[in-house]
Image (cartoon, rainbow, N blue to C red):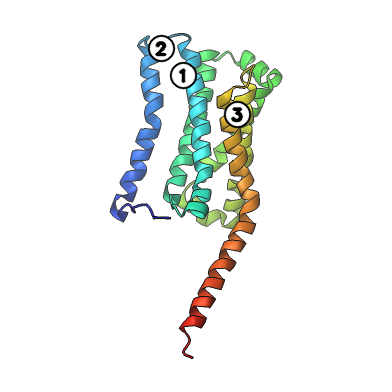
Amino acid sequence: MMPLPALPKRFHAASIWALYGLGLLPAAWTFYLGATGQLIGNPVKIFEHLLGELALRFLILTLAISPLRDLAGINWVRYRRALGLLAFYYVAMHFLAYMVLDKRLAFSVIVEDIYKRWFITIGMAAFVALIPLALTSNRWSVRKLGPGWVKLHRLIYPIAAAGALHFCLAVKVIGPEQLIYSGLVGVLLGWRLLRPRYMDWKRSTRQNKTGFTASRAQPE
């Protein structure tokens, strides 16, 4: 496979900040449309739904970074932190829109919703679980937590599953969107189960080729 052209290292930081800007643009634009009466229908619900859907998309993109590197050789690991934080920002905005714009801070109603409506319970649990991941997504935390950092950040897997389940349960009839997102999350989580065997196979294949090449290079 022909490798993608590599971005010069001096542009890496700028590209990450560009990702943050582009990633948050849909929220700002949709908020503007809603605030200026340009959203047809229920602007609060449309805005709330968009935020939740984008949160799920960024979670999926975060999970896709490792398979892209393993299977296609595309190394976008430097964008994983930004994608994960964008997912967190969208989840936070999704719940803020629900609590402030939709329920108008009627806490008794919100508590009742969390208690009685399972998809809100699951979504709230996923949001709470994302908070320690967002707070520790920095180099200082990586050094401080050591191997525990990796274990903590494996929470992204059940969080993504909970996000997809929340998205499916929020509608009365599961449509193509729910099936696509759930399918992608399922495939990306399934890859984590297959990955150790694949990496072992890849490593042994590389070693065999290297050994073969070395033996051919030996003088007769």
* Residues marked 3 and 2 touching at CB (< 8 Å): no
Q: Is 43 placed above or below 182 here?
A: above
Amino acid carrying label 2: it is: Leu
Mark 1 crowdedness (10 Å alpha carbons): few <14, some 14-19, many ≥20: many
Q: Earlier in the sequence, mark 2 or mark 1?
A: 2
* Residue denoted by label 2: 39
Which residue is more in the foreground, 21 or 57?
Answer: 57
**Mark 3 against mark 2, which lies toward the viewer?**
3
Would residue 7 be found to the left or right of residue 166 on screen?
A: left
Identified at 64% across, 14% down, the residue is: 108
User: Counting residues from the N terminus, which is met first, the one under dot 3 or under dot 1?
Assistant: 1
Q: Which residue is mark 3?
A: 179
For residue 43, above or below residue 18: above
Element marked by disc 2: loop
> x, y percentage for residue 44?
48, 14
Label 3 amino acid? Leu
Residue extending furthest toward the right: 116
Place of residue 216 in the rendered image (x, y in percent of width and height, measured from the top left):
49, 81
- Does 18 sit above or below residue 117? below
Q: Residue visible at 62% across and 22% down? A: 174
199 relative position to 73: left or right: right
Name which residue lies at 57% across and 31% down. Answer: 180
Find the distance from the CA under tag 2 to the CA under tag 1.
9 Å
Q: Secondary structure at mark 3?
A: helix
Secondary structure type for disc 1: helix
Give the label on residue 47, or none: 1
